Image: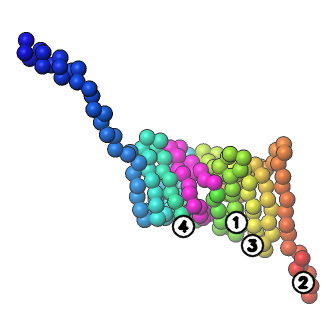
Amino acid sequence: MAVIATLVVLALLPQHPRAVPNATIDLHHVTVALYPQADPKAVWSFEAPDAQYDPDKQDTTLRDIQDGRRVVNGKTDFTLASNRIVIDSNDNLHGEHIQAHLVSEDVNLDMVGAHGRQVLIDQRSGQFEVPRVTVTDPDKNTIVFEDMRIGFDFTTFQAGGPGTVGYGEFVVSSPGKESR
């Protein structure tokens, strides 16, 4: 009887909540390699001073990326820089502001989120999905597009849609005359 009474008293005692440790893993001065399943020929690499991995969400946040790149068959096809990029569980990259340099075309893409949408680098489709992008060529000509999809190889792109704007600025020069 005493044992049963003790067990009943113990069962009725208030439970103390257990402290659950933060599941986020913080890393510093990291080099991250990404081998996307949807793009098996590519290897992405990033160097970042700070990174966080959240096992509950299965995503990784990289901060202050200065040396990001995509390499295919041993050759860099574009580089990336950003203050913050999230790599989700499908290996896609998300960010508010991502700068890319397409090596073979020597073209810069300044990609910015807008209207509540972030820049998405979609591994499955092999495209940048960008709410607003400024494209600058080696001659400093610029073109701005909204709601743009650009293939990783820059051979396919789609821009626009209802209510979107696109404009370009070109530098024109003639021999013996000042650039305009």
- Sequence order check, earlier mark of 1 and 2: 1
Question: Which type of secondary structure does the marked residue at label 2 adopt?
Answer: loop
- Disc 3 residue crowd, few under 14, some 14–19, many 20+, Cα 10 Å: few
In front: 180, or 64? 64
Mark 1 and mark 2 in contact? Answer it, CB < 8 Å: no
Residue depth check, mark 4 versus mark 3: number of the one nearer the observer = 4
Instruction: Name the residue carrying label 1.
Output: 108
Along the polypeptide, which appears first: circle 4 or circle 3? Answer: 4
Judging by the rendered image, the residue that carries numbered circle 4 is 67
Q: Amino acid at mark 3?
A: Pro
The one nearer the camera, 174 or 55, is 55
Q: Main secondary structure of the magenta part?
A: strand
Residue 7 x, y percent position in the rendering:
15, 19
| Circle 2 residue | 178
Q: Residue at x 46, y 61 (%)?
A: 50
Q: Which residue is mark 3?
A: 138
Residue 151 visible: no
Q: Which mark is residue 171?
A: none
Asked if residue 6 is positioned above or below residue 141 in the image, the reply reads: above
Disc 4 residue type (three-letter): Asp
Residue 98 visible in this rendered orientation of the protein:
yes
Horizontal and vertical percent position of residue 166: 84, 55
Label 4 – label 3 distance at C-alpha = 21 Å
Which segment is the magenta one?
A: 77-96
- Upstream in the sequence, badge 4 or badge 2? 4
Q: Quadrant of residue 96?
A: bottom right
Query: Against 105, is 5 above or below?
Result: above
Query: Which SS class for mark 4?
Result: strand
Decide which of tag 4 and tag 1 comes sooner along the chain.
Answer: 4
